[in-house]
Image: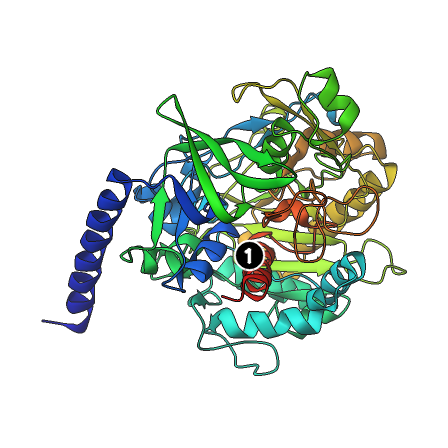
Amino acid sequence: MSKASTLERLDAEFAREVEENQLRLRGSLRTTYDFIVCGSGSSGAVVARRLAENSDVSVLLIEAGGPDSAPEVEMAAAWPLNLGSARDWGFTALPNPHLNGRVIPMSMGKVLGGGSSINVMLWARGHKSDWDYFAAAAGDPAWSYDRVLDIYREIENWQGTPDPARRGRDGLLYITPPTEPNPVATAMLDAATELGIPIFDDVNGSMMEGPGGAGYMNLRINNGRRQSIFRSYTFPLMSQPNITVLPGTLVTRVLIERGAAIGVECLIAGRRHSFKASKEVILSLGAIHTPKVLMQSGVGDAETLASLGIPIVQHLPGVGANFQDHIMVTSCIWEYPEPVAPHDNGGEATIFAKSAPELDSPDIQLLQIQFPVATPELAGRYTIPAGSWGIFPALLRPHSVGRLRLTGTKPEDPILIDSQILSEPGDLTALRRCVDLAREVGNAQGLRRFVKREVMPRALTSAAMDDFIRDGVSTIWHQSCTAKMGQDDMSVVDGRLKVYGVNRLRIADASVMPRVPLANTMAPSVIIGEQASRAIAREHQL
């Protein structure tokens, strides 16, 4: 039997062991666990694992979505099929006057693994300036770039060019550059060189300490298969008796008595259940559901909650405020002379740049996509051949900030997402410059052999370009910052991610970010999970 066949057999045997163990545990649920982790995404999966590594600790990990066994989850190239599926919460933002009144979909993972089970599998760690900003906002040097770099080195199994100062080789997380880059991705880097943009071996190395550059993406893909955070962190421990993973369970409320979280209330198959936590409740539900559950538990802006008839537990006006997201224009497109099949996740090359020279870090990004993507508004305006490729011009440092608004006390009452995308004029200015850069790159000599013609936007007047951007903007699914970490009156958690004014309640997900970093949010969310786990271990002497 070959080594590969032996490994497959062992994997199948372990998967059966996990399934049998979890069926037993779910068949005899306890009323009380030491820790309850709500949400199995890129932070919650980390917290659950780190706590369960201590065999004396009991952990209940609750997930609203179902299993992550669908082929659309496992196969890297199939990721677009998850959007709009049962594995997507299907949120939409309110109609936005700054986007010609458009309603923008806000996909988020509703499945074991959360966003890491449906995303584009890009591992982007964030810029040095982001982490130093987090440390300053929290008043805690544990969030600084140098300290976070230590954690990244510990958890990574980096397959690219060795960089002992910045990259780890022995961690849980398999991370690789493209093994055989698509030739159009290679040509994009040639075009960048032609335009004087420096090329880096590793977009998460020294490049993220400076003004920008270009390189191949870091991918969470192994032999064409997605490597979700849940599968890397939590799944390997699920044969143990001290961790129960409960999918198909909607957390509706944190139970709070005498200023402390004592458990959670949930819906399982439409029936109400409650579980107690003897030590802590950790909310890792993401930047939309975490503030919703907080508000429906009486934690939020007192005036707003009172208007909905929700008893006030703790006045924290920052809950649901400070909504931030990365946005991109979907997209600048060129027709291939001869179509080239997509590789990996369909997007392997990127460029980070500044929209203005005086900025201290990049604020715009070009994301190459190896197949055509356009919003319905632009698809109705242009004829887009199937054999095309594109570049997403993206805004990484938005000044526009939105808010989430609760509509009622019931779990089915929707939360309104007032994104306020492009409400600040400077964001439109930066996106104009980003589209200009995308067109320079796409029309450069280095990419000429992959261009039959520029499909869109082509040369436009200033007014027409603004209209193109407003009709082309979409989210990059990096919703964040709605329960931010900090020390001011709008902060929700402190540097240890503990909710102000509520004991035994912690938040570990992208909602705690003080600002959205220059990164896809998966990797920073893993760091948030690691930081929460370490704080919990110290405080409870685990």
Q: Mark 1 highlights which residue?
A: 529
For residue 370, above or below residue 81: below
Q: Quadrant of the N terminus?
A: bottom left
Kind of residue at disc 1 = Gly
Residue 263 position, x and y percent, is 50, 39
- Name the side, left or right, on which 375 lies relative to 26: right
- Name the side, left or right, on which 40 lies relative to 261: left
Which residue is situated farthest in the right direction here? 358
Q: Mark 1: few, some, or many residues within 10 Å (few <14, many ≥20)?
A: many
Residue at x 58%, y 25% (from the top left corner): 376
Colouring used for the render: rainbow
Q: Is residue 97 visible?
A: no
**How many badges with numbers are in the image?**
1
Residue at x 61%, y 65% (from the top left corner): 189
For residue 526, above or below residue 258: below
Residue at x 69%, y 47% (from the top left corner): 394
Please tell me in which quadrant of the rendered image residue 205 appears: bottom right
Residue 521 position, x and y percent, is 60, 52
**Mark 1 element type:** helix
Residue 182 position, x and y percent, is 46, 60
Residue at x 69%, y 50% (from the top left corner): 513
Please tell me in which quadrant of the rendered image residue 157 appears: bottom left
For residue 334, above or below residue 250: below
Q: Is residue 152 visible?
A: yes
- Name the side, left or right, on which 527 lies relative to 317: left
Residue 491 position, x and y percent, is 77, 45
